[in-house]
Amino acid sequence: MLHTINKSPFETNSLETCLRFARAGHSVLLFEDGIYGAFKGTRFESLITDSLKSKNIYVLVPDVEARGMRTDNVIDGIKTVDYAGFVDLTVDNKTVQAWL
Amino acid sequence: MEDEVIKKFLYVNRKAPYGTIYALESLEVVLIGAAFDQDVSLAFIDDGVYQLKKDQKTSVDSGAGMKNFSKTYLALGDYDVNKIYVDKASLDERGLTADDLMELVYEDEDDDYKEKSSISIVNQEEIAQLMEQQDVVLSF
């Protein structure tokens, strides 16, 4: 299953709730304001690092660059994807759950 | 003008720049307010601090294809909007420092037009005081 997060973790609890319910082996894509959860040094870093032990986490690069954030500051283990990669994720997973 | 009234306006910005329209709308209202020679201050709190992040790139070809309005902040100094307060706690919990922000400057006409920084990194007490001093507070 693919979970998508498009809200800042500082503004809503979508990321935290998603990671609470997503199961091992699931994929989570951070895009739009959701990308703010992907960086080192934030108060969500340990939650992300823990989740990476059992889940795949992706971040959409155009949304990272639009916001002036740096891909080289993304937490180790998160994979970067472009729009084509986003499409691949939706095709490769039978269901997509969008956490709004 | 004899009957000119100057009020203290504070714009409180608490949203990230592109996910919603608040940041862009706030900036538009700030520029309108500045045209009326009011005493304007801006506060950036919570996700609002992301509005000032430098190196925003939104090109249509490779990027998210939205209007990059971050350069407009650089013009605020020319509109005499030079009191920009950024909440330190909000920067800290996002792993950001003052170095991650755009360099917003103005020319101080009372000091031989010397270029000075418009940004002050402040704590919660200073922001609370700032809020208390205002005639009008607009929240975005």
Image (cartoon, coloured by chain):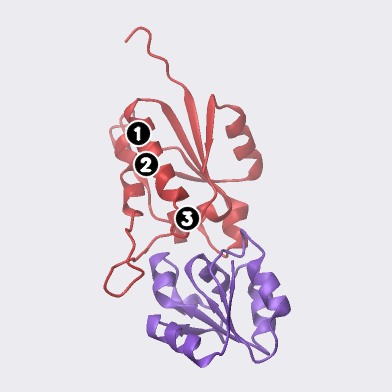
Residue B113 horizontal side relative to residue A13, left or right: left
Q: Secondary structure at mark 1?
A: helix
Q: How many marks?
A: 3
Residue for badge 1: B32
Q: Is residue B94 above or below residue A18?
A: above
Which residue in the structure is indicated by mark 3? Answer: B20
Same chain letter for marks 2 and 3: yes
Q: Position of residue A58 (x, y in %)?
A: 52, 82
Shown colour of chain A: purple
Instruction: Give me the chain letter of mark 1.
Output: B
A74 displayed left or right of A18: left
Q: Looking at the image, do the residues carrying marks 2 and 3 touch, with CB atoms under 8 Å apart?
A: no
Q: Which mark is residue A82?
A: none
Separation of disc 3 and disc 1 at Cα? 20 Å
CA gap between label 2 and label 3 equals 14 Å
The disc, 2 or 3, on the residue closer to the chain's N-terminal end is 3
User: Residue at the top extreme?
Assistant: B2
In front: mark 2 or mark 3?
3
Q: Give me the residue at 43% from left, 43% from top.
A: B26
Q: Which is closer to the viewer, label 3 or label 1?
A: 3
- The residue located at (68%, 77%) in the rendering is A19
Q: Quadrant of residue A69?
A: bottom left
Query: Residue B42, position in %: x, y?
Result: 48, 40
Residue type at mark 1 is: Ile
What subunit carries mark 2? B
Q: Identify the residue at horizontal 28%, vertical 35% (top origin).
A: B113
Question: Which residue type carries mark 2?
Answer: Glu
> Which chain is depicted red?
B
Residue B136 seen anywhere in this rendered image of the structure: yes
Q: Are marks 2 and 1 in contact (CB under 8 Å)?
A: yes
Query: What numbered label is drawn on residue B28?
Result: 2
Q: Are marks 3 and 1 in contact (CB under 8 Å)?
A: no
